Every structure is written in structure tokens, then in C-alpha cells.
Amino acid sequence: MKIGVLSQKGGVGKSTLTRALAVEYSRNDWEVKIADMDLKQSTSTIWNRKRMDNGFTPKIAVEPFSSVKDALKNDSQYDLIIFDGAGQADVQTLEIAKVCDFIILPTGVTADDLEPQVKLAHELKKKGIARQRIGMCLSRVGGSKNELEAAEEYIKATGYTFLGLIAEKTSIGQCSDSGLAANETKYDSINRIADQLIQNIYNHIEQLAKEEVRYG
Ligand SMILES: Nc1ncnc2c1ncn2[C@@H]1O[C@H](COP(=O)(O)OP(=O)(O)OP(=O)(O)O)[C@@H](O)[C@H]1O
Ligand SMILES: [Mg+2]
């Protein structure tokens, strides 16, 4: 299976979600590889070095790649490849989307973040990616219930699936810095929010697969 975590704008939480997904699928005995497509920053590759240095488990395979073709070499060794997209959407974004079973577009709750991501979703759809294969989630969600509800409504009104959220927490930032993921903090209540998002993603992909079997 292949999942792409992509964005129009930088800094929207792609790498944070990618790592949490990788950790949760690995906990469930999937062989997972993160394809770090952000050669300039290589954030997930650096994160994994810290993870290895600190001896955290489950171990995750992370490799930087400059092309989708290279990332897919030896792909049969893995049950899941997660593409951690580059800082900003570029020509490679569509290439990644085309090879993925499912695409996740994380976004912050403000219009500044929401609008470019919805625009990217529309562009991907126009270029042939089925609407059901695109899901959106909220990153860095603060304490305002109104803001969260407004963002959720905005996404739902676009017709793309709303998958859930990751809360904005100092402990998540600290975890990232030491090689842990957003669902590996010291706080169960924080981990549970990210795990719920991942469960929703898993369920949605399962549902897609079933529908494909039914409708071919
Ligand atoms: N839920 C969160 N709580 C606290 N800090 C967060 C959270 N999500 C992301 N961050 C911080 O925000 C920054 C951007 O997040 P992240 O690297 O996941 O985004 P990105 O979309 O991968 O960025 P880029 O486009 O540069 O690759 C990082 O410093 C990360 O640690
Ligand atoms: Mg990143």
C-alpha cells in the first residue's frame, strides 16, 4: 500500500503525520518505509537518525529519495510506503499522488492554510485522482472549539473526507525533536487524538478497497 502526505504550503504537519502513521502501522506488524521526498530539509531522515540513536521502537525505515521511481524500487519488501512530501507542492506532488492508494492533505485551521490545501485537492482531482482517494485532516489544532468546528465544516463542505486531527502540543514538538512521533508522547490523552486520526485513515482505506472489490 502507498500513502502520500502532501501539501501546497510548507509547514502544515506532513512530516508529523507521516511519522505517526509509520509508528502505528509498524506497531501492527506492517513493514513500513517512509520515503522522505524533501531532499532540501530531509526532516524525517534526520528524525529517524535521532530515533535510532535513542533506541526507540518500533524501528522505522526512512530513506531520502529524489524521484518517485527510486522510492518504488524494492517496494515489494514493504507492506506500506508513506511518501512524506516536499515542503511545497511541485511537479513531483502529482507524480506521488498518481502512484498512491490514498492521499492525505494535512492543513492548519486558518483560511490561510485551508484554502491552498483545498485548491491542491481540486487540482489533483482535475488531473485524474479520484475524490475518494483524497482525505484531509487538521494539524496543530489549538484549544478553540469554534475554530476547530469552522475548519471541520469548511472541509466537509468541499466534499473531501475529513479524517480527524492532531492537536497543537508542546510535547509533540519535543517528541519530534527526540525521534518520537505525535502518538508517542507521555500523555495518553494526546496520543489518543492522533491514534483516532490514524484509525479513521485505516478504516477509510479499508472501505475504499472493499468498494473497489465490489465495483471493480
Ligand atoms: N501538533 C503539533 N504540535 C506541536 N508542534 C507541531 C505539531 N505539528 C507540527 N509541529 C511543528 O511544526 C513544524 C512543522 O511541522 P512538520 O514538519 O510536520 O510540517 P511539514 O508540513 O512536514 O513541513 P515542511 O513543509 O517544511 O516539510 C515542526 O517544527 C513541527 O515540530
Ligand atoms: Mg516535512
Image (cartoon, grey):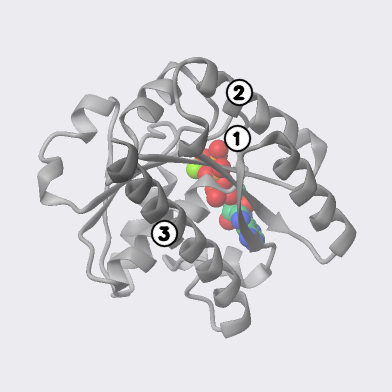
**Residue 171 drawn above or below residue 130:** below
User: How far, Cα to Cα, is label 3 from label 1?
Assistant: 25 Å
Q: Secondary structure at mark 3?
A: helix
Q: Is residue 133 visible?
A: yes
x 46%, y 67%: residue: 178
Earlier along the polypeptide chain: callout 2 or callout 3? 2
Which residue corresponds to mark 2? 122
x 37%, y 34%: residue: 37
Q: What x and y, as percent, mark residue 77?
A: 11, 50
Which residue corresponds to mark 1? 10
Cβ of disc 1 within 8 Å of ligand 1?
yes
Cβ of disc 2 within 8 Å of ligand 1?
no
Q: Quick one: label 2, few (<14), some, or many (20+) residues within 10 Å?
A: some
Indicate the amino acid at tag 2.
His
Comparing labels 3 and 1, the label whose residue is closer to the camera: 3
Q: Secondary structure at mark 1?
A: loop
Q: Disc 2, disc 3: CB below 8 Å?
A: no
Q: What x and y, as percent, mark residue 82?
A: 34, 46
User: How far, Cα to Cα, is label 2 from label 3?
Assistant: 23 Å
Cβ of disc 3 within 8 Å of ligand 1?
no
x 50%, y 54%: residue: 17
Comparing labels 1 and 2, the label whose residue is closer to the camera: 2
User: How far, Cα to Cα, is label 1 from label 2?
Assistant: 18 Å
Q: Is residue 35 visible?
A: no
List the single residue furthest toward the front. 214
Which residue corresponds to mark 3? 202
**Residue 29 drawn above or below residue 206:** below
x 70%, y 35%: residue: 158
Indicate the amino acid at tag 3.
Tyr
Q: Which mark is residue 192?
A: none
Indicate the amino acid at tag 1.
Gly
Q: Quick one: label 3, few (<14), some, or many (20+) residues within 10 Å?
A: some
